[in-house]
Amino acid sequence: MFVLELAYTAPIDRIEAVLPAHIAWLGRHYAEGTFLASGRKVPRDGGVILAVGEDRAAVEAIVRTDPFAVEGLVEYRVTEFLATTVAPVLEAHRQRLPA
């Protein structure tokens, strides 16, 4: 599982201008089952996405297609972790430690 942390590097008016395209991009990845949760940080200086994917390279490739990233408006920090304990609603995404 991955935590994708976005940090805005542009003024909020530029973020707002690209926000509809970013929301459409999120929607595509929710429909594909890659994204599990997302939202703005408080204070509003970026956002967070909880994602699943084949591997880090695949997730990083998705990140590069975010309209915010394409337009150079954000920096991403991708953190991979093993979700070995999850709420029942996320049971399908529970991971095992390597042997």
Image: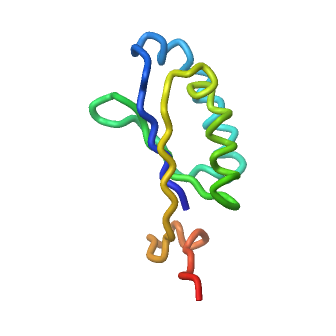
| 96 over 26 or under it: above or below | below
Q: Which colouring convention does the figure follow? A: rainbow
Task: Report x, y in % for residue 51.
Answer: 57, 53
x 68%, y 33%: residue: 65
> Left or right of 21: which side holds 75?
left
| Quarter of the image where one finds residue 27 | top right
| 64 over 22 or under it: above or below | below
| Quarter of the image where one finds residue 70 | top right
Task: Report x, y in % for residue 75.
Answer: 48, 33
| 33 over 68 or under it: above or below | below
x 63%, y 56%: residue: 56
Q: Quadrant of the N terminus?
A: bottom right
* Foreground residue among 87 and 41: 41
Task: Report x, y in % for residue 78.
Answer: 51, 49
Residue at the left extreme of this rendering: 43
| 89 over 97 or under it: above or below | above
> Left or right of 10: which side holds 51?
right
